[in-house]
Amino acid sequence: MRTLKYLTVFLLLAGLAYAADTPVEKKIFTATVDSNGVQRVEITGGEYYFDPNYIIVKKGVPVEFVVKKVSGIIPIPHNILIDAPDAGINFNEDMPSKPKVIRFTPTKTGKYAIICDKKFLFFETHKEKGMEGTLEVVD
């Protein structure tokens, strides 16, 4: 039984080390305005990534992020955070396994960081492991 515990911990740490070295592919998504006048974006959070990780939206048009995390063997907590209150974008929400809606209306053009700031003990934050992206707001 004790050997199984050590093996599980070893595999978990090996997986964390591998994920930290995996390059993140840029996945771009340009939101369109639907018939309700809303820009909807589905975002999945997984083993240290957001998909998509580069999102383009229009200024002054309501946005809905529908966020969820991928369920894995080991439940790793993730959040999605954008800290740009001067642009009308300011939230820090946990990413559940079932879809969750986050609503905002961007008021200023620019590029804003999307991050997961969770971390386990003394390890790097998830952002440092590659769980970050960009929200670009255009006219």
Image (cartoon, rainbow, N blue to C red):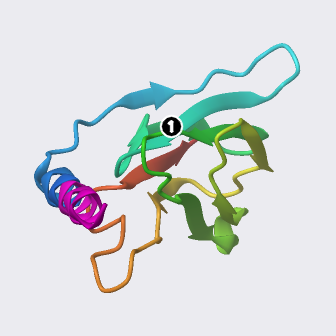
**9 in the magenta segment:** yes
Where is residue 132 drawn, in percent x and y?
38, 56
In the image as oriented, which residue stretches furthest toward the bottom? Answer: 122
In the image as oriented, which residue stretches furthest toward the top? Answer: 35
Asked which secondary structure carries label 1, the reply is loop
Q: Quadrant of the N terminus?
A: bottom left
Characterize the local packing of mark 1: few (<14), some (14-19) or many (20 or more) Cα atoms within 10 angstroms: some
Horizontal side of residue 68 vs 2, given as left or right: right
Horizontal side of residue 48 vs 36, given as left or right: left
Where is residue 20 drawn, in percent x and y?
18, 58
Q: Quadrant of the C terminus?
A: top right
Q: Residue at x 15, y 60 (%)?
A: 17
Tell how many labels: 1
Q: Considering depth in this image, is 24 or 38 the residue closer to the camera?
A: 24
Q: Residue at x 27, y 68 (%)?
A: 128
**38 in the magenta segment:** no
Q: Residue at x 41, y 74 (%)?
A: 119
Residue 2 vs 109, above or below: the answer is below
Amino acid type of the residue that numbered disc 1 sits on in the rendered structure: Val
Q: Considering depth in this image, is 136 or 42 the residue closer to the camera?
A: 42
In the image as oriented, which residue stretches furthest toward the front? Answer: 1
Per the rendered image, the range of residues in magenta is 1-13
- Kindly identify which residue carries mark 1: 70
State the predominant SS element of the stretch in magenta: helix
Quarter of the figure with residue 10: bottom left
Horizontal side of residue 137 vs 22, given as left or right: right
Quarter of the figure with residue 99: top right
Where is residue 121 drawn, in percent x and y?
37, 83
Q: Residue at x 57, y 64 (%)?
A: 81
